[in-house]
Image (cartoon, rainbow, N blue to C red):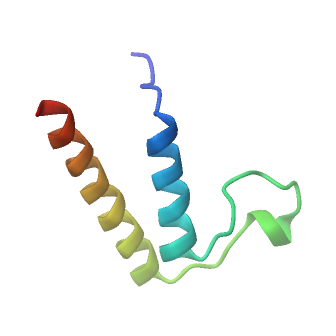
Amino acid sequence: MTKPILSSEAKREIAEIARVHLHIATLEARRRDSLDFHEIAVWNIEAALEAAYLAGMVDHHRKRE
């Protein structure tokens, strides 16, 4: 099974969720542990997952209209 390709809009939404909920400035690998590994509270992870789930639902319903 091939992995679906995300649109540019979806990638921007994911980056925004990471920035807002996980306090991660970029999802690009910077090849430094201090920049690429983050300690994140479970409630922030929960909020990010909820935001991603809701964004997916909105995108799915937008495509059906």
> In the drawing, does residue 30 fall left or right of residue 10?
right
* Residue lying at 26% horizontally and 43% vertically, measured from the top left: 59
Q: Judge from the rendering whether residue 57 lies leftward or rightward of residue 30; answer left or right.
A: left
Nearer the observer, 3 or 14 = 14
Q: State the image quarter where residue 50 is shown.
A: bottom left
Count of numbered marks: 0
**Residue at the left extreme, as displayed:** 65
Give the quadrant of the N terminus.
top left
In the displayed orientation, state which residue is furthest to the right.
32
Q: Position of residue 5 (x, y in %)?
A: 47, 26
On the rendered image, what quadrant is the C terminus found in? top left
Q: Residue furthest top?
A: 1
Q: Residue at x 64, y 79 (%)?
A: 39
Q: Residue at x 41, y 68 (%)?
A: 48
Residue at (45, 24) in percent of width and height: 3
Q: Which image quadrant for residue 64?
A: top left
> Residue 62's spot in the image, x, y percent?
19, 40
Where residue 33 appears, x then y in whole percent?
Answer: 84, 65
Image position of 26 with respect to 22: above or below: above
Apparent side of residue 18 relative to residue 31 in the rendered image (left or right): left
Q: What percent of the width, then of the height, locates residue 43? A: 40, 83
* 56 in relation to 33, above or below: above
Residue 1 left/right relative to 15:
left
